[in-house]
Image: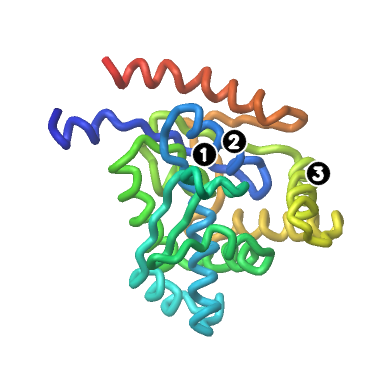
């Protein structure tokens, strides 16, 4: 089979949605069930914030951050057997595994800030699109269905109520040993929702052909099974 034919047969699942909607956990389990690559684009924006912090660059300096990203090599892969330490994905930047170093509240907020810069987004979108030309992917973020993978075979807008998302986020932080206050988490979530919805030319929104999936009150396993029901016919079609 030719390389072009192989690329044409690749399947892309694009998942967008607000912060703490469960996109990462759902996408990772879905990719594992399918044997595909899970691409956490949010981790790439966190890494951009990490690069900025290490270089002493303000999160507001779009050109400097874009330059740092352009000069850096990003590698994303599913965790190997020796990397199964609770991470959802492994992100290597310039040869350094930063998978856990980016999982702080500072870089969570920083990711939202640097993602507002068009220059930074342009650079990272190019890297994300390149990944999708090489693998079957489950890719999640906030602009995947309309900016990164506009031709994805399945587009999902995964969401849940504000309160449920705040509870999920609060629980995640407590599990990591972070002394987090629920009301503070809820306020931060609302701020990030506002920032994402007001973000330049790429605000978080629902595209016309997306499946809007509200997971309020659902277990992760139930969410994954519902999505798999949508994916199986697509896989069958791509193999014909």
Instruction: Examine the rendering and report whether any part of residue 200 can be seen.
Output: no
Mark 2 closeness class: few <14, some 14–19, many ≥20 residues within 10 Å: many
The answer to which image quadrant residue 120 occupies is bottom left
Q: Earlier in the sequence, mark 2 or mark 3?
A: 2
- Residue 158 appears left or right of 143: right
Circle 2 residue: 26
At mark 1, the secondary structure is strand
The answer to which image quadrant residue 103 occupies is bottom right
Q: Residue at x 65, y 50 (%)?
A: 19
Distance of mark 2 from mark 3, alpha carbons?
Answer: 19 Å
Q: Earlier in the sequence, mark 1 or mark 2?
A: 1
The answer to which image quadrant residue 233 occupies is top left
Query: Where in the figure is residue 35, as x and y percent of width and height?
Result: 43, 31
Q: Residue at x 49, y 73 (%)?
A: 51
Q: Residue at x 75, y 54 (%)?
A: 173
The structure's colour scheme is: rainbow
Circle 3 residue: 163
Quadrant location, the N terminus: top left
- Residue 182 appears left or right of 140: right
Query: Where in the figure is residue 127, as x and y percent of width and height?
Result: 35, 56
Distance of mark 1 from mark 3, alpha carbons?
Answer: 21 Å
Front-most of residues 234 and 137: 137
Tag nearer the camera, 2 or 3: 2
Circle 1 residue: 15
Mark 1 closeness class: few <14, some 14–19, many ≥20 residues within 10 Å: many
Front-most of residues 42 and 152: 42
Front-most of residues 84 and 133: 84
Tag nearer the camera, 1 or 2: 2
Residues at discs 1 and 2 in contact (Cβ within 8 Å): yes
């Amino acid at each position: 089979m030719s390389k072009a034919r192989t690329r044409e047969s690749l399947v892309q699942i694009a998942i967008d949605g607000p912060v703490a909607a469960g996109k990462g956990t759902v996408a990772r389990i879905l990719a594992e069930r399918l044997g595909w690559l899970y691409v956490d684009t949010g981790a790439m924006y966190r890494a951009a914030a990490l690069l900025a912090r290490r270089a002493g660059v303000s999160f507001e300096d779009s050109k400097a951050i874009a330059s740092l990203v352009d000069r850096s090599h990003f590698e994303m892969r599913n965790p190997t057997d020796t990397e199964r330490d609770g991470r959802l994905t492994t992100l290597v930047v310039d040869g350094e595994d930063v998978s856990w170093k980016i999982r702080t509240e500072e870089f969570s907020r920083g990711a939202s800030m640097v993602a507002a810069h068009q220059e930074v987004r342009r650079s990272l979108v190019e890297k994300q699109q390149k990944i999708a030309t090489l693998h079957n992917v489950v890719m999640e973020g906030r602009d995947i269905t309309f900016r990164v993978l506009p031709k994805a075979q399945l587009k999902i807008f995964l969401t849940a109520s504000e309160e449920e998302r705040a509870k999920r986020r609060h629980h995640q932080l407590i599990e990591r040993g972070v002394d987090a206050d629920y009301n503070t988490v809820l306020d931060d979530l609302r701020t990030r929702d506002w920032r994402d919805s007001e973000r330049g030319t790429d605000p978080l929104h629902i595209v016309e052909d997306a499946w809007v999936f509200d997971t309020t009150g659902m277990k992760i396993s139930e969410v994954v099974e519902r999505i798999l029901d949508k994916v199986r016919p697509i896989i069958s079609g791509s193999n014909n």
